[in-house]
C-alpha cells in the first residue's frame, strides 16, 4: 500500500488574508527538550510569489537541506527573525514560558510587523504583538511555520556547535544538547556546565548529589 505524505501548504496564510490580514507570519520554536542551551524561536513572513521549493517540517529534512533552505528563506522572505530565551530564563520561568518568550521576541523583531500569526502548537503565548492562531503540527501543515522551524533549528544547531568548541566532551555538535545516552554519560562524568538547565531533572539530580 502506498503511503501518501502530506506537505505543508499556504492555505492557512491565504485564509487569514481572506479575513483581512495583510502580513501573516509563521512561528515555531526548537529546543524545549534539551538539557543544555537556549530555546530558540523564529518568525517568517513569506512572499507568496517567492516561496522556496522543499519547505517542510525541519525534522523531516537533512542537515544539508535545512541549511540550504535557511539561506533561501532569508533571501526570499518578506521578513524573518530569530530570537532566543536563555538558560537562565528557562530556569527562572520554566521551559514553556521561556519558549513563549522566544516566540514573542521573534514576532516583535519582524519588519514589517505582522497583523496575524500562525503559531505551532496548541497554546498561544500571551502578550503577542498581533492576533494569532495555534496550529497543532503546524510545521508539517503550514509553509510559513515550516520556514520558521527551519530557521530556528539551523540557528540553534549553530549555537550548540559553537558551545561544543568551548565545552568539549558533551557531544553538543551532534546531539544539540538533547539527552542522548552519550550526553547523559558525559554529564555524569564531566559535571554540569554553565550552559546546562539546572531546572531539568537529570541536571538537578547531579547537582543535588554533589551537594
Image (cartoon, grey):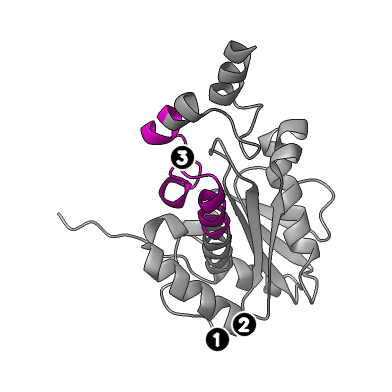
Residue to which mark 1 is pinned: 50
Residue 52, position in %: x, y? 48, 80
Q: Residue at x 42, y 55 (%)?
A: 59
**Residue 124, visible in the rendered structure:** no
In this rendering, would 140 be left or right of 73?
left
Q: Is residue 206 above or below residue 157?
A: above
In the image, residue 29 above or below residue 65: above
Is 169 magenta? The answer is yes
Label 2, label 1: how far apart the Cα atoms are: 5 Å
Q: Residue at x 54, y 44 (%)?
A: 167
Please identify the dominant SS of the magenta region: helix
Residue located farthest toward the bottom when viewing the structure as drawn: 49
Q: Residue at x 70, y 70 (%)?
A: 24
**Label 2 or label 3, whichever comes before in sequence order:** 2
Give 74 or 116, whichever is nearer the viewer.
Answer: 74
Dot 3, how many residues are within 10 Å of its Cα: few (below 14), some (14-19), or many (20+)?
many
Nearer-the-camera pick, 116 or 93: 93
- Identify the element where label 3 is drawn: loop
Left or right, 183 with reference to 206: left
Contact, mark 2 vs mark 1 (Cβ under 8 Å): yes
- Quadrant containing the N terminus is bottom left
Which dot marks residue 170?
3
CA separation in Å, label 1 and label 3: 40 Å
For the residues carrying marks 2 and 3, which lies nearer the camera in this image? 3
Question: Which residue range is magenta in the image?
Answer: 156-185
Residue 142 location in percent, x, y? 53, 63
Of pointers 1 and 3, the one earlier in the residue sequence: 1
The image position of residue 118, as x and y in percent, is 65, 59
Q: Is residue 48 left or right of residue 140?
A: right
Q: Residues within 10 Å of mark 2 (few under 14, many from 20)?
A: some
Give how far apart the Cα atoms at labels 2 and 3 are.
40 Å
Tag shown at residue 47: 2
Amino acid at each position: 500500500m502506498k503511503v501518501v505524505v502530506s506537505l505543508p501548504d499556504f492555505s492557512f496564510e491565504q485564509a487569514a488574508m481572506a479575513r483581512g490580514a495583510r502580513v501573516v507570519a509563521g512561528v515555531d520554536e526548537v529546543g524545549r527538550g534539551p538539557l543544555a542551551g537556549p530555546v530558540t524561536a523564529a518568525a517568517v513572513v513569506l512572499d507568496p510569489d517567492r516561496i522556496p521549493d522543499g519547505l517542510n517540517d525541519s525534522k523531516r529534512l537533512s542537515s544539508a537541506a535545512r541549511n540550504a533552505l535557511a539561506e533561501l528563506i532569508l533571501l526570499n522572505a518578506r521578513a524573518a527573525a530569530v530570537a532566543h530565551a536563555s538558560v537562565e530564563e528557562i530556569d527562572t520561568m520554566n521551559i514553556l514560558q521561556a519558549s513563549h518568550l522566544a516566540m514573542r521576541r521573534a514576532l516583535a523583531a519582524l519588519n514589517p510587523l505582522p497583523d496575524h500569526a500562525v503559531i505551532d502548537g496548541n497554546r498561544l503565548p500571551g502578550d503577542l504583538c498581533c492576533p494569532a492562531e495555534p496550529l497543532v503540527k503546524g510545521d508539517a501543515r503550514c509553509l510559513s511555520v515550516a520556514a520558521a522551524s527551519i530557521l530556528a533549528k539551523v540557528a540553534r544547531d549553530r549555537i550548540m556547535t559553537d558551545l561544543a568548541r568551548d565545552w568539549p566532551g558533551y557531544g553538543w555538535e551532534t546531539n544539540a544538547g538533547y539527552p542522548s545516552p552519550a550526553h547523559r554519560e558525559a554529564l555524569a562524568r564531566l559535571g554540569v556546565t554553565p550552559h546546562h538547565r539546572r531546572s531539568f531533572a537529570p541536571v538537578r539530580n547531579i547537582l543535588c548529589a554533589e551537594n
